[in-house]
Image (cartoon, grey):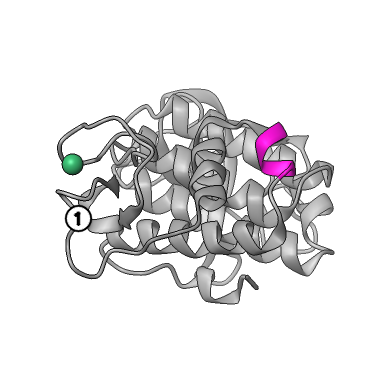
């Protein structure tokens, strides 16, 4: 069987047979890959805990007829160690993994930007320097943008008229001017709209200067935007306290 190497973040695992697992990975060069880890549930497994969700690993894989088989795994960054003991970081991180899996649904389609966003987001989540909710919101907006669903927080999403505008509607792609606004649009506070723009561009000076009430309002709008653009809601998002 032909072998290949790649680095990856483990998104999800599930049991296969007596001792094996299927590991869902977001790889640097091959996009999403589902591969079999043989014997990984035995205590003598050479992979140990290297193939748990959140772990950033260097892998060797053998191409299989249906699923590839993991033949070597070395830990590059043990993100699970920094995330698993903190409820907020764990629940937010789980939403990131689930979002990555949903946005990169096609197997073996290279998705380098998604991979880099996920590794960067997990690194920020583990460092603890920033609020887990804001790391998550920033990751969600940026990965939606990479997937082709970039929201507009300044120009009107419908006519392109220069902002700032007052109305926000997820189904229309972001902010709307007074002419284009549709029934049911939200009218967030100007500070919230500025925070949303900063979350999308990663402008942490603005995010850190934003008060909790506006950050919370921003989180609600990010969740609404994400829900609109994914066909089914995320199972894990309901556990994030906002
Ligand atoms: Zn307009």
**Viewer can see residue 72:** no
Residue 177 in sight here: yes
> Is 210 included in the stretch rendered in magenta?
no
Q: Nearer the viewer, residue 73 or 174?
A: 174
Q: Residues within 10 Å of mark 1 (few under 14, many from 20)?
A: many
Task: Give the residues in magenta.
Answer: 205-209
Say if 102 sits above or below 199 in the image: below
| Image position of 164 (left or right of 131) | left
**What is the count of numbered marks?**
1
Q: Give the quadrant of the C terminus.
A: bottom right
Q: Secondary structure at mark 1?
A: loop
Tell me what residue is drawn at x 62 percent, y 56 percent: 215
Report which residue position mark 1 lands on.
181
Asked whether 64 or 74 is in front, the reply is 74
Residue drawn at 54 percent across, 26 percent down: 6
Quadrant of the image containing the N terminus: top left
Residue occupying image coordinates x 70% and y 60%: 212
User: Who's the residue at 61% across and 63% down the image?
Assistant: 216
Q: Nearer the viewer, residue 198 or 30?
A: 198
Name the residue furthest front: 178
Magenta: predominant secondary structure element? helix
- Tell me, yes or no, whether the highlighted magenta stretch contains residue 207: yes
* Mark 1 Cβ and ligand 1 under 8 Å apart: yes
Q: Residue 188: x percent and y percent?
A: 45, 59
When the figure is inspected, residue 75 is found, relative to residue 173, above or below; the finding is: above
Q: Position of residue 143 (x, y in %)?
A: 44, 40
């Amino acid at each position: 069987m032909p072998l290949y190497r790649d680095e990856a973040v483990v998104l999800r695992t599930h049991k296969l047979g007596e001792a094996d697992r299927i590991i869902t990975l977001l790889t640097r060069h091959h996009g999403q890959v589902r591969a079999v880890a043989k014997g990984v549930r035995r205590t003598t497994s050479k992979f140990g805990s290297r193939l748990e969700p959140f772990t950033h690993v260097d892998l060797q894989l053998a191409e299989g007829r249906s699923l590839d088989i993991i033949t070597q795994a070395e830990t590059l960054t043990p993100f699970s160690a920094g995330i698993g003991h903190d409820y907020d970081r764990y629940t937010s991180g789980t939403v990131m993994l689930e979002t990555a899996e949903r946005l990169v649904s096609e197997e073996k389609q290279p998705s380098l930007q998604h991979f880099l966003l996920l590794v960067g987001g997990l690194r920020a989540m583990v460092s603890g320097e920033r609020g887990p909710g804001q790391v998550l919101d920033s990751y969600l907006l940026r990965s939606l943008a990479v997937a082709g669903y970039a929201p507009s927080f300044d120009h009107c999403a419908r006519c392109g008229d220069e902002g700032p505008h007052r109305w926000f509607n997820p189904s229309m792609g972001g902010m709307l001017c007074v002419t284009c606004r549709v029934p049911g649009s939200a009218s967030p506070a100007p500070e919230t709209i500025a925070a949303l723009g900063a979350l999308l561009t990663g402008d942490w000076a603005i995010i850190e200067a934003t008060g909790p009430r506006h950050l919370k309002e921003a989180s609600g709008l990010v969740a609404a935007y994400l829900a609109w653009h994914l066909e089914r809601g995320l199972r894990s998002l309901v556990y994030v306290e906002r």
